[in-house]
Amino acid sequence: MSTYSSEVEEGKRFEFGKNWAAFLKALDEDRIGEAEKSLLAMLKLNDLLDRTFLDIGSGSGLSSLAARRLGAKVHSFDYDLDSVACTKELKHRYFTGDSDWRVQAGSVLDQKFLAALGQFDIVYSWGVLHHTGEMWQALENVTTLVKDDGMLFIAIYNDQGFRSQIWKRIKNSYCSGTSLQKKLMLAIFNCYASARGLLVDLIKMENPLRRYRLYRRARGMSLFRDREDWLGGYPFEVASPEQIFLFFKEKGFTLQNMQTTNSPGCNEFVFRKEIQCVE
């Protein structure tokens, strides 16, 4: 069975954690506040007091930090050890020695590991499960982690058919390329994305800086860090909103909130797990 390090060496996996480490240098109170607002808005809650919160694929640790500051008891894990280190760094900065925030390494595909976690009021996994290499199995696994009447908040790449297949090849090429090739591909992608955004803003007669301010308010993330995350995000799988909805409906989940996109980016879903009647 392949390990994380061997997958990276073979060009089969992007090192998300190293990218997130760079993002932490730019993290400030405004970004944290926006992450908190975004989380509450999708969950349609006023706070997370006394709720248990599982962050699957915690990445930078920003969402875990937001949940903890909103009052949740948080458990974070990630397959990428650099991401685990990022999350631990945020815990150290803001909640040193806090017993209500646990951080560890683990895989959402490891059912033995998941069984030991128990169940949670809120299970959260934003833009993670489609990078496991076994997305549908990962989606199956997370259903067992949600308490009855609990909530599941996930974001999954939108299926755009042939366009998604092209991006899969690009991402694979990026991950398997040399350091120089990666820098060149990222530079070209940044130029393309910036030029495209500028053209759209000019056509709409909008201030080009508005795009960056809006992006900052979307989950508190960084535009340029997310661009590298997108370009390198491999393994890469996709699903249509209908596929996700039907999958979880069959598992006893009811859709509570949804935001879809016309781009190859993420569709967001919040489901509630129906209470199982015991006869």
Image (cartoon, rainbow, N blue to C red):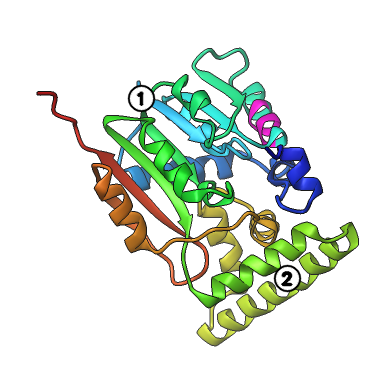
Task: Report x, y in % for residue 181.
Answer: 86, 65
Provide the secondary structure element on which disc 2 rests.
Answer: helix
Q: Is residue 118 above or below residue 58?
A: above
Magenta span: helix, strand or loop, mainly?
A: helix
Q: Amino acid at mark 2?
A: Phe
For residue 226, side relative to residue 256 (left or right) = right
* Distance in Å between CA atoms under marks 2 and 1: 41 Å
Q: Which residues are magenta?
A: 83-88
Q: Of marks 2 and 1, which one's residue comes earlier in the chain?
A: 1
What residue does disc 2 label?
189
- Residue sitting at x 71%, y 62%: 172
Within-10-Å neighbours for mark 1: few <14, some 14–19, many 20+: some
Relative image position of residue 3 (x, y in whole percent): 71, 37
SS state under label 1: loop
Q: Looking at the rendering, in which quadrant would you find the C terminus? A: top left
Mark 2–mark 1 CB contact (< 8 Å): no
Q: Is residue 99 magenta?
A: no
Label annotation for residue 51: 1
User: Residue at coordinates 77% horizontally, 39% vertically from top-left?
Assistant: 5
Q: Is residue 28 left or right of residue 240?
A: right
The residue at the far right in this view is 180
Residue 85 highlighted magenta (yes or no) = yes
Viewport quadrant of the N terminus: top right
Q: How far across and down, in percent of the image, does residue 37 sit?
A: 43, 44
